[in-house]
Image: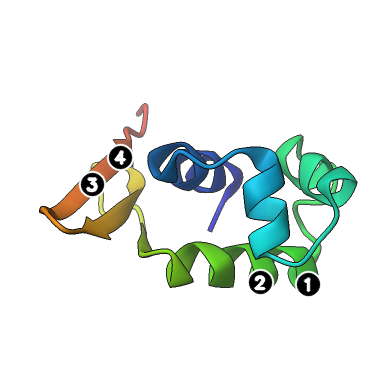
Amino acid sequence: MNLVQLRMARAGLGWSQERLAEAADMSLYAYKGVEEGRWLGMELYMSRLRAALEQAGITFLDDDGSGFGVRRKGASGAEVWRHLSVR
C-alpha cells in the first residue's frame, strides 16, 4: 500500500481521518502524519492501516502497467479505483 492508495481507499469508503485512525487503533495525530507522508515508512502504522482497510473490504492492486489502485467489495459488486501511471 502506498500513500495514494491509502487516500483512495479512505475516500472510497467515505471515511474521515478520525474514522480510519480509530479503526487502525492509532491516534489522529499519528494518522495525519502518515497521510502527510511524515511517517509513511513506519511499518507498524502502515500494517495497522492496511489491516483496517482490508477488514472494511478494500483490496490493494499493484501496478499492472495501467497504474496501481484499490478495489472495494460491496453489495452491488466490486468498484475499482485506479491511479494512472504517467509514463
Q: Nearer the viewer, residue 65 or 3?
A: 3
Which residue position is annotated with label 1?
44
Identify the residue position indicated by label 4 in the image: 82
**How far apart, in angstroms, are the residues tagged by discs 2 and 1?**
5 Å
Marks 3/4 in contact by CB < 8 Å: the verdict is yes
Q: Position of residue 38 (x, y in %)?
A: 85, 42
Q: Which mark is residue 47?
A: 2
Residue at the left extreme, as displayed: 76
Q: CA distance from mark 1 to mark 4?
A: 25 Å
Q: Quadrant of residue 12?
A: top left
The answer to which of 14 and 33 lies nearer the viewer is 14
How crowded pointer 4 is (Cα within 10 Å; few <14, some 14-19, many 20+) is rated as some
Q: Are marks 2 and 1 in contact (CB under 8 Å)?
A: yes
Q: Is residue 61 in view? A: no
Numbered mark located on residue 72 in the image: none
Q: Which mark is residue 80?
A: 3
The kind of secondary structure element at disc 2 is helix
Q: Residues within 10 Å of mark 2 (few under 14, many from 20)?
A: few
Locate residue 63 relative to residue 78 in the image: left or right: right
Q: Secondary structure at mark 4?
A: strand
Marks 2 and 4, how far apart in space? 21 Å
Q: Amino acid at mark 3?
A: Val
Q: Secondary structure at mark 3?
A: strand
Quarter of the picture containing the C terminus is top left
